[in-house]
Amino acid sequence: MEPIDKKAAIAAYKEQKTLAGIGTVRCTATGQVWLVDSRNVDSFENRIRFELRSGGHRDRTLQTAWAAHGEAAFAFEILERLPEDTSPLLLRGELKARLEAWRARLA
């Protein structure tokens, strides 16, 4: 890459918007579903896969299922993206409210 291309790529990366939202991790072997709220819903799958592969995911039931059934038994899905204009001050509360709404819907 030429230096000018690197600078343009870095600038484009810094300007890209991240969307918060709700996603699921589903174990196809057992049918278990875990709901996840994320400040960057487009990358939640990569983050969770990394945590599970390294054995450090904070949800022990998910980590145990991963160890028992393997990576191939898991599917990831984005359920909802919050609007771009969601205030950063309200983001945490909005994610929590949407997560609870999805829990009620999927129960």
Image (tube, rainbow, N blue to C red):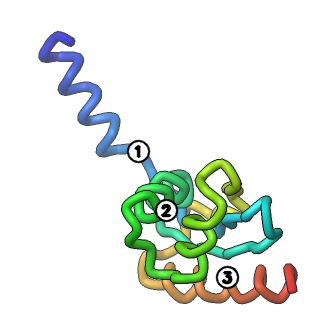
- Give the Cα distance between marks 2 and 3: 17 Å
Q: Earlier in the sequence, mark 3 or mark 1?
A: 1
Q: Which of the numbered marks, if any, corresponds to residue 99?
A: 3
Relative to 91, 55 lies left or right: left
The image quadrant where one finds the N terminus is top left
Residue at left 49%, top 84%? 92
Q: Is residue 74 above or below residue 32?
A: above
Q: Is residue 40 above or below residue 58?
A: above
Label 1 Cα crowd, 10 Å radius (few <14 / some 14-19 / many 20+): few
- What SS does tag 1 mark? loop
Residue 42 x, y percent position in the rendering: 55, 52
Label 2 Cα crowd, 10 Å radius (few <14 / some 14-19 / many 20+): some
Relative to 12, 80 lies left or right: right
Q: Amino acid at mark 2?
A: Ile
- Give the Cα distance between marks 1 and 2: 21 Å
Which image quarter: residue 89?
A: bottom left
Residue 73 x, y percent position in the rendering: 70, 54
Q: Is residue 91 above or below residue 13?
A: below
For this rendering, which residue is in front, 88 or 107? 107
- What SS does tag 2 mark? helix
Q: Which of the numbered marks, if any, corresponds to residue 59?
A: none
Q: Which of the numbered marks, if any, corresponds to residue 16?
A: 1
- Give the Cα distance between marks 3 and 1: 25 Å
For this rendering, which residue is in front, 12 or 48? 48
Label 3 Cα crowd, 10 Å radius (few <14 / some 14-19 / many 20+): many
Q: Amino acid at mark 1?
A: Gln
Q: Which residue is mark 2?
A: 48
